[in-house]
Image (spheres, helix red, strand yellow):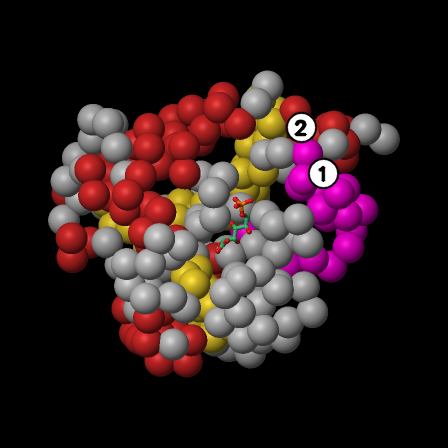
Amino acid sequence: MTIQAQLGERFRYHVYPDAVTVADALAQQILRHSQEAIKARGVFKIVLAGGTTPQASYRLLASAKTDWNRWHVFFGDERCLPADHPERNSTMAAEAWLNHCAIPHRQIHVIEAELGAEEGAARYRQQIQGVPPFDLVLLGMGEDGHTASLFPGHQHDADEFVHAIHQAPKPPSDRISLSQAVLCHTQALIVVITGAGKHQALKRWLAGESLPIASMEPVCGIDMLLDEAAISG
Ligand code: 6PG
């Protein structure tokens, strides 16, 4: 069975020619979800993915015409680095997008990972108390099948909303991550995967391996955006 046939059995998915067209499609989907949420509930609560894949989409959002006052931005995970460190997920999102639009600063809910994994996680648990369900959660996937900062072989307290992560295989080793359950407590969830480097993890996911990305089974289902390289390897 082809990868696309396997994808079709389980997900709503769309394959684009390359990362540029994926980025444009993701930006459009984010705006579509925001319009639906704002119309239905007056606010749009989005959880951002980190890493590099969503960066081009975030740049496109910087010039979007929308009611930014209705947006509340959260982060799926954060790296335990100083607050303005260039490798922080919050810095990537701020430089690409959030510093260039009118979302009120108090509505950008950064994870205080500079305090360390335990203290930062404890504070974010307070910050997101009562917030879910989110309107949209964005997730990337690592080449080992991790997502957010949920890594293969790591055990977490299922009752925790926010995990302190140690010994992460993707530097830095200390991180903070929303839990699988909180990431799935959403009206919509988009997984964005580009590049040949993700092909093997995608195949392992579809083959049924118990990878962190495979634990994402939101009631709303998953919408997946991929490029040809991720599909064909
Ligand atoms: C991080 C992210 C991580 C990321 C994947 C994919 O802190 O790096 O939260 O989960 O989404 O590793 O990363 P790329 O988009 O850079 O391939």
Residue 200 belongs to the span the image colors magenta:
yes
Q: Residue at x 41, y 38 (%)?
A: 55
Q: Quadrant of residue 169?
A: bottom right
Residue in the image at 24% along x and 27% along y? 63
| Residue 28 visible in rendering | yes
Distance from label 1 to label 2 (Cα)? 8 Å
Q: Residues within 10 Å of mark 2 (few under 14, many from 20)?
A: some
Quadrant location of the N terminus? top right
Horizontal side of 106 relative to 194 (left or right) equals: left
Asked whether the viewer can see residue 7, the reply is no
Give neighbour class at mark 1: few <14, some 14-19, many 20+ (Cα, 10 Å).
Answer: many
Q: Which residue is mark 1?
A: 199
Start and end of the magenta stretch? 196-220
The answer to whether 189 is drawn above or below residue 215 in the figure is: above
Given residues 95 and 5, the one toward you in this image is: 95
Q: Is residue 3 above or below residue 151?
A: above
Q: Are marks 1 and 2 in contact (CB under 8 Å)?
A: yes
The amino acid type found where label 1 is placed reads: His
Figure quadrant of residue 228 = top right
Name the outermost residue toward the front.
86
Instruction: Name the residue at the right extreme.
Output: 1
Identify the residue under disc 2.
229
Residue at 33% from the left image edge and 33% from the top image edge: 59
